[in-house]
Image: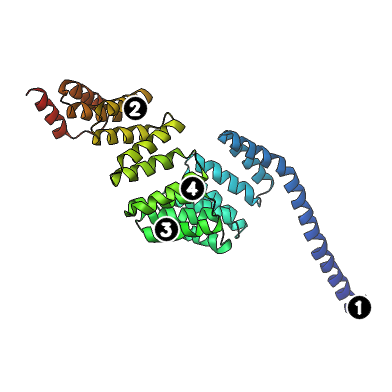
């Protein structure tokens, strides 16, 4: 056999190896993926039910069978995120991104975790990357706006929410959040407008009623404020913030009996929290019922509510007049 024949045999052998082995590897991958799929689905089911430990076990099995299953890393990251095990969540989202550099939801979710950890620059970088991949990714715009709001970059936060409502003009949460930014920014009439739009889209949004009521109170429209707080309570009878805000507004109007009723309701809903006792104690002080005021204030202190000592001393002094 001459050298030419040897070369031909060698070339044919190499071609066969290059052809056969990728096919075999791809076939193995398909089988592995098919075998892993039931475990992945079980993991998702456990996650949806709140059974986080079982979900992790199922996703672990998936990744043992197929270490390239990016969705399993993503879902395991979601589980760790819910468990507030943020470093583990970041690790899993990063693995998902390594396997799929265009995994937009993994960037968004990892950015959310960085935000939770207070690492805002990293969070923004991830949201920027998500929007580079998908310029209509609403969650990334919303999350980026939240960071700008936290940084008191209100104008930039508004820009982000504007983009969201351009993409989806019927997204009530975007109007609600934008209203909250306008409220912090001191643009109260714009805040009221956004809360109103949110309520037109979602009439059961009790927090929007409450927040609009707060803004009405700030600009001195007490009747409108009380109406909104009452509507929030009508939708959610256990919504403590609405009771406290309505009670405070009733005090501002001089309707102390109504205020006492609201603060007593707070105590009924959360008896182990000192807030209701504090506000009721303040109201008793305003109507010169100093003994009742002191009892409530001491109870609030026992429950850990932060009351300035000079305020308590003032009430004790009033009692002995």
Q: Secondary structure at mark 1?
A: loop
Q: Which residue is mark 4?
A: 173
Label at residue 266:
2
Q: Secondary structure at mark 4?
A: helix
Farthest left residue in view = 321
Q: Position of residue 319 (x, y in %)?
A: 11, 23
Q: Secondary structure at mark 3?
A: helix
Query: Above or below — where is 230 with respect to 190?
Result: above
> In this rendering, would 108 be left or right of 257?
right
Quarter occupied by the N terminus:
bottom right
Query: Above or below — where is 143 with respect to 217?
Result: below
Among numbered discs 2 and 1, the one appearing first in the sequence: 1
> In this rendering, would 207 be left or right of 54?
left
> In this rendering, would 98 be left or right of 66?
left
Q: Which residue is mark 3?
A: 158
**How far apart are labels 4 and 2 at the CA level?**
27 Å
Label at residue 252:
none
Using the image as rendered, state which of residue 110 and residue 285 is in the foreground. 285
**How far apart are labels 3 and 2 at the CA level?**
34 Å
Q: Residue at x 34, y 55 (%)?
A: 187
Q: Which callout, 4 or 1, points to the residue nearer the camera? A: 4
Among numbered discs 4 and 1, the one appearing first in the sequence: 1
Among numbered discs 3 and 4, the one appearing first in the sequence: 3
Q: Secondary structure at mark 2?
A: helix
Q: Position of residue 72 (x, y in %)?
A: 63, 46
Q: Which residue is mark 1?
A: 2
**How far apart are labels 2 and 1 at the CA level?**
98 Å
Q: Which callout, 1 or 3, points to the residue nearer the camera? A: 3
Q: Position of residue 318 (x, y in %)?
A: 10, 26
């Amino acid at each position: 056999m001459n050298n030419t024949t040897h070369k031909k045999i060698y070339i044919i052998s190499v071609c066969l190896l290059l052809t056969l082995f990728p096919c075999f590897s791809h076939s193995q991958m398909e089988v592995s993926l098919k075998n892993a799929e039931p475990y992945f689905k079980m993991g998702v089911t456990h996650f949806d039910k709140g059974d986080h430990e079982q979900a992790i076990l199922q996703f672990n099995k998936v990744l043992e069978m197929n270490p390239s299953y990016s969705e399993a890393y993503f879902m395991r990251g979601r589980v760790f995120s819910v468990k507030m095990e943020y470093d583990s969540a970041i690790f899993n989202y990063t693995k998902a991104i390594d396997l799929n550099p265009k995994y937009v939801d993994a960037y968004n979710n990892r950015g959310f975790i960085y935000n939770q950890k207070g690492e805002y620059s990293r969070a923004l970088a991830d949201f920027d990357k998500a929007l580079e991949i998908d310029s209509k990714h609403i969650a990334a715009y919303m999350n980026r706006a939240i960071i700008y709001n936290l940084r008191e970059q209100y104008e930039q936060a508004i820009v982000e929410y504007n983009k969201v409502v351009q993409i989806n003009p019927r997204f009530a949460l975007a109007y609600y959040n934008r209203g909250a930014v306008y409220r912090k920014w001191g643009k109260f009439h714009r805040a009221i407008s956004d809360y109103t739009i949110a309520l037109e889209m979602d009439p059961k949004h009790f927090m929007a009623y409450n927040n609009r009521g707060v803004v009405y109170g700030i600009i001195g429209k007490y009747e409108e404020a009380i109406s909104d707080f009452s509507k929030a309570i009508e939708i959610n009878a256990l919504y403590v913030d609405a009771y406290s805000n309505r009670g405070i507004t009733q005090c501002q109007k001089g309707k102390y009996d109504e205020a006492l009723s609201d603060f007593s309701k707070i105590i009924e809903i959360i008896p182990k929290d000192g807030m209701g006792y504090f506000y009721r104690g303040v109201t008793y002080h305003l109507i010169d019922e100093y003994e009742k005021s002191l009892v409530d204030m001491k109870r609030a202190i026992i429950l850990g509510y932060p009351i300035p000592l000079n305020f308590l001393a003032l009430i004790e002094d009033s009692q002995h007049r």
